[in-house]
Amino acid sequence: MIRNLEEVQATLEVARISGGGLLPLAQSLTMAQGAMPGEMLLMEIDEALDKALVAGERLVVRGDREEKVILCTNSTSYVVRAADTSNLLLVASGFTGPAQAAEFKGPASLAHVQICGFASSLLETRLCKPGLRKLRALLGEMPYSAPEEERMLEEDLGPAGLTTAELLQVIQSSEVQLMAALKDLHACQINGRWRMLSFDYEMRLLGLITQLVDSESWDFHLVPLSTCLEELEPLEPREMIQHCLECYGQRLCHLVEVHYALDEVRVCRALAEMPAPCLHLVQFV
Amino acid sequence: MKTIIVISTMLITLLLGKKRRVDSARKLEFWHLDVSAKDSDEPRPSACVGQPDALSSEIHGPQAKKVADCWERVLRRPPMSDDFISVTSSEGRRVYLRLRREGEGTIISDRHCTLRGSDRGLRLLGVPFQQLKEQLADKQRRKILEELEQHETAISRIIEQDIRDSEPTDDVGEDPCRDEEEVEDGPRGADAAAAGSFLWVDKFSPRHYMELLSDDHINRCLLKWLKLWDVVVFNRERRAPRTHSAMRGQETAGGDPRGSRGRGQWEAHRGAAMNRRGWVERGGGGWEGSKERGKGGWRGRGRGGGDGTWYKSKAQMMDEILEEELDDHKRPKYKVALLSGPPGLGKTTLVHVVARHAGYNVVEINASDDRSPEVLRTRVEAATQMRSVLGAAERPNCLLIDEIDGAPLATINALLEIVNRKDGKEKPAAGTTRKKERKKKEGGLLVRPIICICNDVYVPALRQLRQQAFTIAVPMTMASRLAQRLTEITKCQGLRADMGTLLALCNKTDNDIRSCINTLQFLHSRGEVQLSLGLVQSLQVGTKDKHKGLFTIWQEIFQLPQTKKSWMDKAQAQLGESDHDRASKSLENSRFHRILQLTCHSGEYDKISEGLFANYPNVRTNDPQMECVVAALDWLSLQDEMASMVARRQAYTMLRYMPMASIALHMLLAATRAPRLNYPAAHSELLARTARTLALTDAVMGEARSTVRCYTNGRQLLLDSMSLMLDILSPRLRPVNTQLYSTQEKRQLQQLVHTMVSYNLSYQQERTPDGNYLYVLEPNLDDAARFPGVPHPPSMPYAARQLVSREVQLEKMRRTEAALHARNPQEQSKPNLEETKDGETLDKEKKKKGAALKSHERKLEDTIQAVTVVDKPEKDFFGRIVQKKEKEKFTMAGIRYPVLEADAMQRRVGRAIGHSDVWFRFNEGVTNAVRRTIYIRDIL
């Protein structure tokens, strides 16, 4: 039941579309045996996703039951939407698209293409921002305010905070994006669990560091880690001091000793969030 | 031929007889007067006096001699040699006249001969004319002598008087009237007649502002208004408004030096008048006195500098107008002043004096004389845009338009047009130099004040002007002030009169200055020296024909005269007629005459009686028995009868009794309280309603069918049928569908519709002001047949009327159609014929078969045959038959092929598609599919 070129010409004549303007390559579509509707789910993907798939990355759909479908690769998130068309979508392998067909030179020829499936709807993926509101809400529930209180809380309620795996289950975001977001939030991993520092505690840590920098007359961009930790150890835990330095500064490793370059903008922004008497910008900076 | 013409004129003169003679007598008299008065050197027309016939002298005075010369030219017999003409006198005597060529000797024929011939037999007067003439001259001479004597005595008396009371003489030293008298002293002695022609009114008219008799405030307002023009007219700066006292001071100081000089003397007079006024108050009492007191008080305070309370509101209003800013052209807002008031108040004099005082030259126009708009326009323009060149003092003109209420509307509109004229090109600061340029231009800006005077401001024609004019109502002159002026005049003229008498005179003339002075002059010329109260009371002069409004007349009829009564009483008392009966009788008499005059002057008896009839039941009288009312009704019906008599039989003798009814009503019903009067509308309403009803009846008659019309006429329809018809037209119909009616109801409806159609009545939907819809009979018989206010049986409900209306319209259509058919039956039958032709065969077959076969015998074939559809040829848009193509082309879908070619095609296309109806078409592009969000629960 395979058509030849002559038949195709006759059909064109019947359809009254014979004549000029037709590309020489004719493709005869044949329905494959046993192709049934509903067997295929078509999804439209962009190039990055394509590459990721080819590279063998995992695709994860994250979120609760009532949330939109967000498809996450390692580093990006896509929102998935369904598009129902009235046209029938045929799936064929070896089909020459119009662009390629135009490049085809030579005498009129007939190519045979087998349709392996068809569908009437497809899934579209669209690049989207990760859903981080939920993250902020989760971490904000129980911020880390002080080591002493933390101990008491731990006794009462058990360990607070969520692990990375738990977060990835809940938050509709790719892993990379999640980590970036956690860093942005100044979240800190304590015993494998992500915690956000309470604002007061964070300010206290920052205050300590800046006072130390001030009293030691260090360069703001060159804060030695070890000296700093030694100086502040009696006041706060080392991890927290270091975390704070991480948050507000840039780790410099090229020197003999590890130094941190504090970022003025970030520090100032944090200080500005403190409830303070009205200041002029000039005086403040 | 001239001769003949002359003779014929003579004959006509003879025939005209008496009238001509009177004329001639007058002329002769005039000559005599001339002779006696002037002692002229002109030759006395003694020749004519000497003539036996006065007529000739009258007609051809200077030619008399010539006539005497040639009077023998008339011949008894026909002349032998010359041409002649024969003339026959009225007695049949024939004379002959020679004919001569023109310019040859005497032309005038000898009619004297004729006259002489007839003179002996025909004498028109018993006494010869000459004798009569001489007698007349004698009489005249004697009269003049007598008058001379009188005047001499009068003058001597005045001189004596003057000597006696020296104080007034000093005052009067500068009095203008006194001046004039002294100047005229000589001529008057010599020629009294000439002095007599000089009216006292003119002689004693005020010359200065301070001499004005009218109300001070009015004078001041007018003067202020005139002063507002100063900016434009005299190019003067406008002074800032200041207090009244300052203004007054300025006015008098700035005015004529003579005026200010004369002021002291007038003040003295006023003081004297004030003193005397005390007497008036005590004696007069009543409203007169109280008014005087108020006036006096006001003036006293006005002197002090503040404005009194008496005229406060009015004064304030006037002042506000006068304080207003000038317009763009620096003219006052009101360009025209309108003075109004009854005649004889001295309005014209006021304007003259005030305008002269303000430095204007008064140009007077009488609007009743110059009635046409063109004349007025030219005159106004001439007056407002030109200057008097000849006068010694070059003063700007001030236009005075007198009696403007006599002018027609067009004229007043023309005046308004001039007043409101805008000159766009003119700069606001229009100097006097530019005025000359403008003079040539037609229709410049009005830059001169215009003052109008009228008696009645509320004339309809003046309505427009009234709104744009500074309206001043001149109030009545104060009796005391007038009387005081009269005493001065009498003193000047040597009449003796006390204040009371003069006040009585003022009262009699309603404070009309002109009338008072004229009366005084009249009395003086009659030779009266001592004026007494009795004399004044008995005078018939001094009363004027005053036209009063209808409401005034009705009011005066229904109201007792209060104000006059006290005066009358006083007059009676002073005359010594203390007898109460007589006094009351004379009072009634005066009432009688007053109403008689009032009614006669108005002349509108019908309107007056209508008003009386409308208002007499509302007048409150002490009349428990209703006798007065009955009597009044009788009188009114009597008058009505008389009026109808006059109208019907031209019995104009009855007209003189017309005012009697109003007099009678006055006597019967007059009350002290002012009645509340309504304008009688009953008559006009009745007329309107009658006209409406008649028109309606005519309409119904005209519209009704001739079968109805021939049995009735309009009157019968209106009086008999219509009211009953209304009942017939509203039967009890249920407002439901007519299909549900019982047979009786159906018949009722049919009858109703029939009636309505035959009278061509219908129901029309109308919208009432409150938004409801009504079906109203058209024409509306209710208007004509039912009395308003009388309850009538309930009419049909809205729905029933709607139903009836529809039925009537249907019935009408049916009838017109029927009528049409009846008129031309052929036309009507045509369409039917066509129909039959169309379906002829079909019908015939049907009939045949229908007739032949019974229903159970019918076969399907027959039925099919009956309904076979005739294949109509296909037609295109233009109606041409489309030729069907034999070879049908393949359709796009390839479903249908002609059977012959199908196999070949199938072979060619191949079996791959087979006979499938499904074709795919590749579409390249972006899908327009509807995207929907999917949730995780959907994919789980």
Image: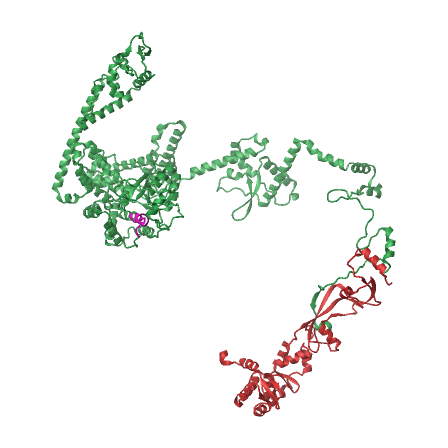
Chain colours: A red, B green
Residue B849 visible in the snapshot: yes
Instruction: Tell me if residue B581 can be seen.
Output: no
Seen from the viewer's position, the closer of residues B249 and B747 is B249
The picture places residue B348, in percent across and down from the top left corner, at 29, 41
Q: Is residue B78 magenta?
A: no
- Quarter of the picture holding the C terminus of chain B: bottom right
For this orientation, the residue located farthest to the front is A106
Residue B158 shown left or right of residue B429 in the figure: left
The total number of labels drawn is 0
x and y, in percent, of residue A185 in the image:
61, 80
Q: Quadrant of residue B157?
A: top left
Percent across and percent down for residue A161 are 64, 83
Q: Is residue B225 magenta?
A: yes
Relative vertical location of residue B874 with respect to residue B11 in this rendering, above or below: below
Could you tell me which quadrant the N terminus of chain B lies in?
Answer: top left
Residues B361 and B661: in front is B361
Q: Is residue B823 above or below residue A113?
A: above
Q: Nearer the viewer, residue B740 or A259?
A: A259
| Residue B917 located left or right of residue B167 | right
Question: What is the magenta segment's predominant secondary structure?
Answer: helix
Horizontal side of B886 relative to B68 (left or right) equals right
**Residue B21, image x and y in percent?**
27, 21
Q: Residue at x 83, y 57 (%)?
A: A11
Decide: is B27 above or below A119: above
Q: Which residue corresponds to the image point at 37% horizontal and 44% vertical from the top-left?
A: B444
State the extent of the magenta-drawn residues as a range.
Answer: B223-237
